[in-house]
Image: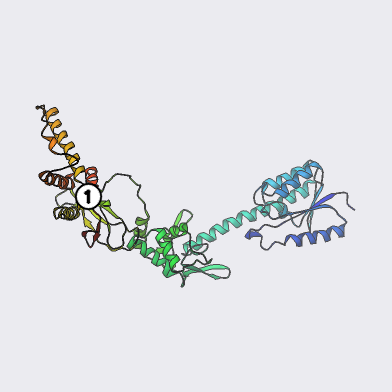
């Protein structure tokens, strides 16, 4: 029996470039038979499933080198040289141990490499050839993928709404999924035409029982990635380059661009605009809250007109069709209710605010215009009891604030109106 203490090392990578390599069990079986025929001393069997493309990436192999350095083994028994190394780093470590006299022999199924110049040189050539094959394979794969892209076929799994057509284990075509394509198309249209959010789309998918090819409801992140994917209008990016796909687009580029605008969320500017009449009423169609927004109209001879519109916030019913109403119309209808006596008003609060404003007015005349301070007959306006004429004055003052006051003043004035309103078909009604 040989004096060399062998470690039987078997390896197989799970990567596609080693699919045809003999299995680990088969390697061990063949090398045990070889050891019996040639009476080799196998001290231990070690195996692992790792790629040998990168140096130091295999924990079992790294430990094997360390044990050889310590003198535990003096030989390696393996199926082929490429089982040991496909990179320059690991190859250098093996040759270095041979140069130090710690590794006497590397024996494969068909060859032996002893510690002499010629056999070490041959080992280096065979392992370098394995590295060259790896490098060329990577280049060829990239070249093949680029050629496929130039043909208009996107590599990889088809996105939601499409299916890959496989011929000879390769993607030959990407076609619309007859079961899911219409749903993806509807997703784009709902966002582009109705401004639906990703969460609204997901709720709709849940309602119709939509499932992916894996049998699951799409996650919110996948819905957004789908809506952002240019593949659906006919183009795709692979690496740093863009390609024109030969697949059938599910939406037009115009629809896709509208969706991108809808999905672009502008930064929030808290409290930039104050719309005091948002709390005045609720939507008469769905019972949800009312919100407001500003719109600008460009004038023919320069400048802009600003308009404020109030409408349903659609928090209860996203598809609520309650029409918009301008702030001017809303104020007119509110004043009409006040004039008709349809609402109850906290006259005490109005009197207090009116008194404060009169005092501020007299102080302005005295200090800014440098006139004699005019106290006025302010005592006639009391918080607890207001006379008939003062009632009219208080109500006129309230209407004045609603028409011309600041947002804060209007908000305060609305708090003095004791009534609930609903907005239905552009008409403000007392609830």
From the top left corner, tell me how far across and down residue 11 is, in percent. 72, 56
Residue 77 falls left or right of residue 258: right
Few, some or many residues within 10 Å of mark 1 (<14, 14–19, 20+):
some
Residue 259 falls left or right of residue 410: right
Image-quadrant location for residue 186: bottom left
From the top left corner, tell me how far across and down residue 122 is, in percent. 74, 51
| Element at label 1 | strand
Count of labels in the image: 1
> Can residue 234 be seen from the camera position used here?
no
Measured along the vertical axis of the image, is residue 171 above or below residue 325? Answer: below
The structure's colour scheme is rainbow
Measured along the vertical axis of the image, is residue 173 above or below residue 307? Answer: below
Determine the residue located farthest toward the right in the rendered image.
Answer: 1
From the top left corner, tell me how far across and down residue 159 is, in percent. 48, 63
Front in this rendered view, residue 204 or 353:
353
Front in this rendered view, residue 371 or 98:
371
Measured along the vertical axis of the image, is residue 64 above or below residue 146? Answer: above
Q: Which residue lies under the disc numbered 1?
A: 417
- Residue drawn where x is 44% and y is 69% of the image: 208
Image-quadrant location for residue 247: bottom left
Residue 104 falls left or right of residue 411: right
Front in this rendered view, residue 208 or 146:
208
Determine the residue located farthest toward the bottom in the rendered image.
Answer: 178
* Quarter of the picture holding the C terminus: bottom left
Determine the residue located farthest toward the front in the rendered image.
Answer: 385
> Can residue 161 be seen from the camera position used here?
yes
- Residue drawn where x is 46% and y is 53% of the image: 240
From the top left corner, tell me how far across and down residue 263 is, in percent. 37, 55
């Amino acid at each position: 029996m040989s004096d060399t203490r062998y470690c039987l090392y078997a390896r197989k990578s799970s990567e596609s470039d080693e699919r045809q390599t003999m299995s680990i069990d088969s390697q061990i079986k063949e090398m045990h038979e070889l050891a019996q025929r040639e009476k080799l001393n196998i001290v231990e069997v070690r195996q692992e499933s790792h790629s040998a493309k990168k140096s130091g990436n295999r924990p079992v192999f790294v430990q094997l080198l360390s044990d050889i350095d310590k003198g535990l083994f003096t030989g390696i028994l393996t199926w082929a040289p490429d089982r040991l190394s496909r990179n320059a780093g690991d190859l250098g470590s093996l040759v270095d141990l041979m140069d130090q006299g710690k590794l006497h022999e590397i024996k494969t199924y068909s060859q032996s490499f002893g510690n002499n110049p010629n056999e070490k040189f041959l080992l280096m050539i065979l392992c370098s050839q394995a590295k060259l094959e790896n490098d060329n394979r990577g280049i060829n794969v990239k070249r093949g993928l680029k050629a496929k892209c130039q043909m208009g076929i996107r590599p990889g799994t088809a996105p939601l709404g499409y299916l890959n057509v496989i011929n000879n284990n390769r993607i030959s075509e990407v076609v619309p999924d007859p079961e899911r394509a219409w749903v993806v198309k509807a997703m784009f249209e709902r966002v582009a035409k109705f401004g639906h959010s990703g969460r609204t789309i997901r709720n709709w998918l849940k309602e119709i029982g939509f499932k992916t090819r894996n049998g699951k409801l799409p996650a919110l992140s996948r819905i957004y990635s789908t809506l952002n994917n240019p593949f659906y209008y006919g183009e795709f990016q692979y690496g740093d380059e863009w390609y024109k796909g030969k697949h059938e687009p599910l939406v037009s580029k115009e629809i896709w661009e509208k969706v991108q605008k809808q999905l672009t969320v502008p930064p929030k500017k808290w409290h930039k605009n104050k719309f005091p009449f948002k709390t005045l009423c609720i939507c008469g169609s769905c019972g949800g809250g009312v919100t407001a927004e500003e719109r600008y109209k460009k004038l023919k001879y320069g400048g802009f007109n600003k308009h404020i519109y109030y409408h349903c916030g659609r928090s209860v019913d996203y598809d609520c069709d309650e029409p918009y109403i301008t702030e001017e119309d809303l104020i007119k209808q509110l004043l009409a209710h006040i004039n008709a006596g349809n609402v109850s008003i906290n006259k005490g609060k109005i009197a207090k605010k009116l008194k404060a404003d009169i005092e501020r007015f007299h102080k302005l005349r005295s200090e800014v215009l440098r006139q004699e301070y005019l106290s006025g007959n302010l005592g006639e306006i009391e918080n607890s009891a207001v006379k008939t004429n003062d009632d009219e004055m208080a109500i006129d003052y309230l209407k004045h604030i609603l028409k011309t006051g600041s947002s804060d003043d209007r908000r305060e004035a609305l708090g003095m109106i004791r009534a609930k309103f609903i907005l239905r078909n552009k008409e403000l009604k007392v609830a």
